[in-house]
Amino acid sequence: MKIFLNNLLAIYRRELQSYFSSPFAYVIAVVFWLIGGLFLVTILLSPNGLIAQVAAADQLGVSPQPVDVPYEFLKIYLNLLGSLSMFILPMLSMGLYAEERKQGTLELLATSPLTNWVVALGKLLGVVTFYSAMLLPLLIVELVAFWSSEPTFPAAILLLGHFGLLLLAASVLALGMFISSLSDSTVLAAVMTFGVVLVLWVVDAIATSLPGPIGEALSHLSMLTHYTDFTQGIFDTSGLILFISYILLGLFLTAQSIDTLRFQRS
């Protein structure tokens, strides 16, 4: 067990260092922060934002019931961050193994004493940690905004929504890691990952057009449906199981892909 943890930590540190030393990763982070910040300001403070709409409705006396502005903001904002992440995450995962192929170090990993599961898990933890670091400044800004709300907004709902976002990100990154292991082209890996994730994101819309058990089964595969539950403060174990299943599937397929390469080299 100690050897396993030491190997996992070594891969994790190596991967995390590669992201924090990559100019391209910082460009992605800056774009994410700028767009995420723009979303936040637009939703809350723009002339057509939530605060202005609620204030106008109160002045005109047309609001039938009080509006929970923090809750409505959180739902809208996390949905927008989820959609934005669908474009950002494939660019983070595209080099996980494709760069190893391009630099000729993938063969070393494939033939090393480290198990493929350890390498894949270490890489996934590294990129998820980097994404979490990208998300942290936006979370701090949200906390500042919610701190001034009256009455105080429940922190549990805020944390649950971001927990769902991390689960979504880990699922996409795990699947993207597998796709990255199939090619030495980072661009191709990013495009293929985006295509796969897009299908899983909107599969619910496809399921509604299919009657019977097939449509019902497809609806359970939708990332969007289960992620929306988290953004609304609903903890559904089926959503947790779905995202964990995608993560394990990505790890398994990646390990099998590298194991195939190891078999070819032997």
Image (tube, rainbow, N blue to C red):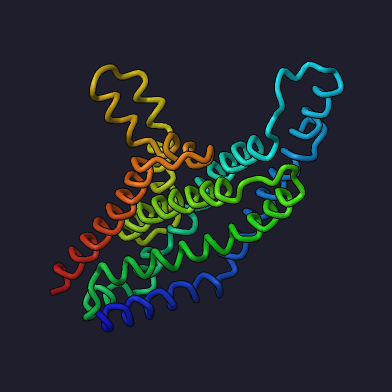
Question: How many labels were placed on the picture?
Answer: 0
| Vertical position of residue 108 compared to residue 258: above or below | below
Residue at 44% x, 72% y is 15
Residue at 49% x, 55% y is 91
- Residue 59 image offset from top left, x and y in percent: 86, 22
Residue at 85% x, 18% y is 60
Q: Quadrant of residue 266?
A: bottom left
- Residue 259 image offset from top left, x and y in percent: 19, 66
Using the image as rendered, state which of residue 117 and residue 160 is in the foreground.
160
Q: Quadrant of residue 107?
A: bottom left
Give the residue furthest to the right. Answer: 59
- Residue 251 image offset from top left, x and y in percent: 29, 59
- Residue 55 image offset from top left, x and y in percent: 82, 29
Residue at 51% x, 70% y is 19
- Name the side, left or right, on which 245 lies relative to 164: left
- Name the side, left or right, on which 56 lies relative to 15: right
Using the image as rendered, state which of residue 194 and residue 202 is in the foreground.
202
